[in-house]
Image (tube, rainbow, N blue to C red):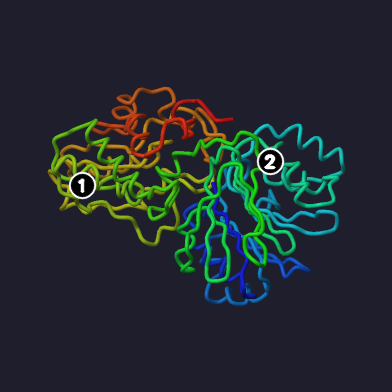
Amino acid sequence: MCGIFGMVSNQQDVARRISFGLYDLQHRGQEAVGIVVSDVKNIKECRRKGLVAEVFNEEEGERILGQLPGRFGVGHTLYSTIGKGGEEKQPKTFQPLIGDFHGQPFALAHNGNLIHLEELRKEVEEKGYNFQSEVSDTEVIIALLSTSREKDFLEALLGVLPRLKGAFALVILFKDKVIGIRDKFGIRPLCLGRQEGSFILASEDCALHTLRGNFIREICPGELIILGENGIERSLTWAENPQLRFCIFEYIYFARPDSRLLGQRVYSYREMAGQIVAEEHPIEADIVCAVPESGEIYNIGVSQVLGLPLVRAIFRNRYFPGRTFLAPRETDRKSLQRIKFYILRELVHEKRVVITEDSIIRANVSPELVAMLREAGAREVHLRVGSSPIRFPCHLGIDMATHGELVAADLTEEEVGRKVIQTDTLGYLSLEGMVKASSLSKEKLCLGCFTGEYPC
């Protein structure tokens, strides 16, 4: 899962505008940030480890962005889902990646995850392509385009896309064009917006906020759209039999609450999910509070149904950077919890407390928080979760790729609650409740990590 952004601007400061868009997509990836711009003749880049605010800080930001002139550009915030972390080990994983198409440079930013790449890697290596990363799925797309025999870039792209398996939303910069693409199932989001005379492609419409842009529409599953200096130049369906299978985890965790996905505000899903899980798992208690920030909004729905006051008793250290789930794999997530959270003892002492979470994946957060609440004197601790038990790996863009890391993979809901989290009761939202909260039919959702049934 990453944040991608593309823009065709009516001014030369497209890099600065892209940086604003990436600020609003920081929640989708916090390991690295990159911007590549074109003035038609040349492309220039900045790709660095860190948050957007760190890379484009007050001291260096203006200087860096001033060295990226142009009206056409793409940007990326990185969330690694496969392979090793760090640019030293994988020099081409900080995106957008840059390729060469018959002597013309192009840049590509990818959100998602591709599968079954062994034959494609072997094919392009036999054509002479030298991979700079052992595991980057994005570089496979670069390699296929770089070794294509087609002389026209669009024709080469149309030849490559049907060969890609998995989830992908792409923005591509080539000369004076910015191209947006969504996979045939629309697993990952991508939308189109406008800011005065400029046109924008972004993972979520919240990326238009700081720029004061206007949302136009979402890119359809299997659609390719081309933006040029005069705006939208062309739109076509590249995939055969496209059909929507949108990742429900976008609603549950990844997307920003103010984003609108498939016509529904993300906030609405989370509030309704809280209401339904409270109806499915009623409990007598004294207060409801959220796990910051993942359990927020869910707590509103739970409070409404249970008729309990909302209390802000768990606080997040404002100086703790980023989202724990997005941290690289080598991070000891459990050790971060006492640094990240603190409890206001007076609000929970001798109280029966209901806490809310969006999901439980590895159970790194909940056990420590329950222990902290008990240390603060809570009489009972009950956990309500705005999604079903995650029992299967995700191969399509979320970093939970192995069965063994999923706490609910081989345990019942009761075992997760009592043995692992050690809460008095644990209530997961049912699969039917998730679908209802999404306002979509089950057939239009990817529920692979909950059911083991994947769209591809």
Left or right: 45 as drawn, with respect to 297: right
Going from N to C along the chain, the mark reached first, 1 or 2, is 2
Crowding at mark 2 (Cα within 10 Å: few <14, some 14-19, many 20+) = some
Secondary structure, mark 2, is: loop
Q: Is residue 133 visible?
A: no
Residue 164 numbered mark, or none: none
Left or right: 32 as drawn, with respect to 253: right
Q: Is residue 29 visible?
A: yes
In the displayed structure, 86 sits above or below 198; it is: above
341 or 39: nearer the eye?
Answer: 39
Secondary structure, mark 1, is: loop
167 or 232: nearer the eye?
Answer: 232
What residue is pinned by disc 2? 135
Q: CA distance from mark 1 to mark 2?
A: 45 Å
Res 19 → quadrant: bottom right
What residue is pinned by disc 1? 376
Specify the amino acid type for callout 1.
Ala
* Quadrant that contains the C terminus: top right
Specify the amino acid type for callout 2.
Val
Left or right: 406 as drawn, with respect to 224: left
190 or 367: nearer the eye?
Answer: 190
In the displayed structure, 83 sits above or below 409; it is: below
Q: Position of residue 18 (x, y in %)?
A: 57, 65
Q: Position of residue 331 (x, y in %)?
A: 50, 46
**Residue depicted at x 38% and y 55%:** 258
Q: Position of residue 307 (x, y in %)?
A: 14, 43
In the displayed structure, 98 sits above or below 124; it is: below
Q: Number of numbered discs present?
A: 2
Crowding at mark 1 (Cα within 10 Å: few <14, some 14-19, many 20+) = some
Res 13 → quadrant: bottom right
Q: Which tag is nearer the camera, tag 1 or tag 2?
A: 2
